[in-house]
Each structure stands twice: as structure tokens, then as C-alpha cells.
Image (tube, rainbow, N blue to C red):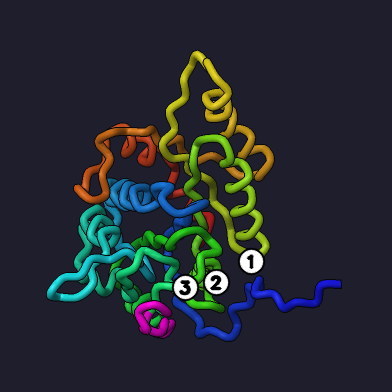
Amino acid sequence: MNNLPTKFDFDITRYPQLPSLSGVFVTGTDTEVGKTLVCGAIARALRSKGRLVEVFKPVASGCRKTPAGLISEDSEFLAWAAESRRTLAQITPLRFGPALAPNVAADRTKSPVNLNVIFDAYRALQNTADVFVVEGVGGLLCPISDSFWVIHFAKMTGLPMVIVARPDLGTINHTLLTIHAARTAGINVAGVIINRYNPDPKCSDDSEIAMQTNPQQISELGGVPILALVPDESENSVSNAVIGPDTQFAIDSVDWDKILSAAS
């Protein structure tokens, strides 16, 4: 029998309680699935409804060095999308240079992860906006520290979760695993957004058939709504702070008021 210890422990009682805020927590099935772009579009969608929006990303790696310190491109984009009045350091309190998992980046740069910096920054969000868009880093089981992962922070916030997924072959497995992990931890999954969706109506090969049928498979097998199919739009650029009109339309079409009211 395998009696090796496991770190799949989603107990958050050993961490301090965080304030109850109105908003959504956005995670991805993997890195580079476009969750930052989606977060920005959500922030803009909520702003268009007259909401005062703030954004938060607890940790970022792959940051660039500047005379003022490490800067996260994702944080810059989120700040632009929300028209945030807060500093980039307040939006993303922990930043690392190497483009690695945060705990590995921290170890290699000899910069221990101070979770209290994240918790204090999140508490400071109170009374700064009507609604908040929080973005994780990497996937849901991405380690921030060795024993504290994105899933722990997501559970601590109590926010409904939006999962950003790939459109192509393999996404069913990745997405269902993410849904399962979230529900195992007691997190409310509001739905899935499939990014870079570009089906070929001719269904000329297996890859196109997979892309066209994946949304229904995820919805039925995962028991979740597909909130939006975001197109693969060439105009989209986090680095240039551009959200294409079709992408924004897809996110605007989601009933965000319903998601927020169901969580309150």
C-alpha cells in the first residue's frame, strides 16, 4: 500500500479569513489559455454596465525589470481594462522575474513567498469598487508556495469561479479535471469560457470536429454552462492593451449580473 503523504489538502482554516467581496475568480485549465485577456474583457463588460471595477492578480512571474521594480504585463493590461485607480504593485503584490511556477521562481531568486503580502493586499480592496475581477496564475493547482496553491486562494476569496479553457483536442480532459478539483475544494464553478474558438463549419478533419463538439461535451459531462465562445481574433493583444470587438461582444453577452447575484 502507498502511504506516501499527499499535498492535496484544501483546508484553508489555518489561513486568515479574507473579506467577502462581490466579483468573480478567473482561472485557466493551463497557462497561456488567455485568461488575462478574458479577465480584461470581463472588467470592461462590467464597467459598461456602470459598475466601478477593480482587478487583482495575487502573484505573477515572468515580470520585466524596471528602475521602479518588477512589472507584470498582465497587471498593466488588467489596470487598463478596469481603468484602475490603484498601483500595479497593489494589483499584483507578489512579482517574480523568472517565468516559472511562483514557488520555483521564489526559490531560484531566493525571495521567499510571503503570503501575508497577498492577504493584506486583498483586504485593501474593500470599499475600492463595486465588483472585483480576480485572476489566478497558471492553472488551479499551480503552487504559489509549496503548500499554498491557487486553489487555496480561490477558495479563501469565496468568489464564483470562471474557468477559461482551450478549444481544441484535449480540452475536455483538462477542463473536467479543473472543474473536479474546484468542486472537491468546495468552490462554486459559475461556468466555462472557451477561448480562441474558431470552428470550421465544414468539419473537414478530426481537429475541427473536436473543436465544434468540445463545448457540448464539457457542458454535459461537467454539468456546467458554457458562458461564452470567444473567437480567435487577431486583434487581441495583452501586450498592446487591445481587446477585439468580437471578443468583447462574446464576453458582454454573458449574464454577469446573474452570476454575481447568485454568489451573494
Distance of label 3 from label 1 (alpha carbons)? 17 Å
Badge 3: how crowded within 10 Å, few (<14), some, or many (20+)?
many
What amino acid type is highlighted by mark number 3? Answer: Ile
Q: Is residue 26 magenta?
A: no
> Label 3 belongs to which residue?
144
Camera-near label (3 vs 2) is: 3
Quarter location, residue 70: bottom left
**Label 1 vs 2, first from the N-terminus:** 2
Left or right of 125 on screen, residue 211: right
Q: Earlier in the sequence, mark 3 or mark 1?
A: 3
Q: Is residue 88 or residue 157 the one in the foreground?
A: 88
The Cα–Cα distance between marks 1 and 2, rounded to whole angstroms, is 8 Å
Please tell me whether residue 257 is drawn above or below residue 118 in the rendered image: above
Name the residue: 60% across, 82% down.
13
Q: SS at mark 2?
A: helix
Residue 260 in view, yes or no: no
- Amino acid, disc 1: Ala
The picture places residue 171, in percent across and down from the top left corner, at: 56, 41
Q: Disc 2 designates what residue?
A: 152
Q: Amino acid at mark 2?
A: His
- Residue 81 place in picture, x, y as percent: 25, 53
Q: Which residue is mark 1?
A: 185
Provide the secondary structure element on which disc 1 rests.
Answer: loop
Q: Are marks 1 and 2 in contact (CB under 8 Å)?
A: yes
